[in-house]
Image (spheres, helix red, strand yellow):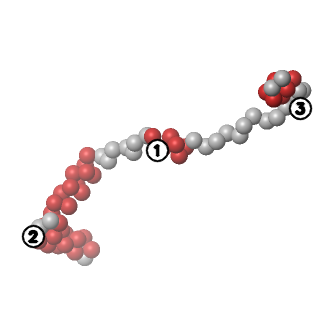
Amino acid sequence: MSASDAASTLPPAVRPAPPVHEDVGAAVAAVIPPRRVPLQKRLFWSTVLLLLRFPRGRAWLASRQRRQLHP
């Protein structure tokens, strides 16, 4: 007689509890890829990074930032 057979013949009040549920959220999150960034946001940051590559682009972005900070 195995341990599982012995446990199944015990009255319900004496039977061992089933294994505790384990959180699998981290394992599931590791398998599911993150959602894609919206197109408008990708285009915005691509443009900002492109402008930052050039001195005139940096100057233009700096002037826009100053304009927003001090209207």
The three-letter amino acid code for the residue at tag 1 is Ala
Q: CA distance from mark 3 to mark 2?
A: 79 Å
* Mark 3 neighbour class, 10 Å CA radius: few under 14, some 14 to 19, many 20 or more: few
Is label 3 in a helix, a strand or a loop?
A: loop
Is residue 67 among what the camera can see? no
Image vertical order of residue 66 relative to residue 8, above or below: below
Which residue carries the number 2 mark?
56
Which residue carries the number 3 mark?
13
Q: In which quadrant of the rendered view does residue 25 lie?
A: top right
- Which residue is at the front of the view, 24 or 46? 24
Residue 64: horizontal and vertical position, in percent? 19, 69
The three-letter amino acid code for the residue at tag 2 is Arg
Kindly identify the residue that appears in the image at 89 percent across and 33 percent down: 14
Which residue carries the number 1 mark?
30
- Which residue is at the front of the view, 6 or 10? 6
Give the number of the disc on residue 3: none
**Mark 1 or 2, nearer chain start:** 1
Labels 3 and 1 touching (C-beta < 8 A): no
Is residue 12 among what the camera can see? yes
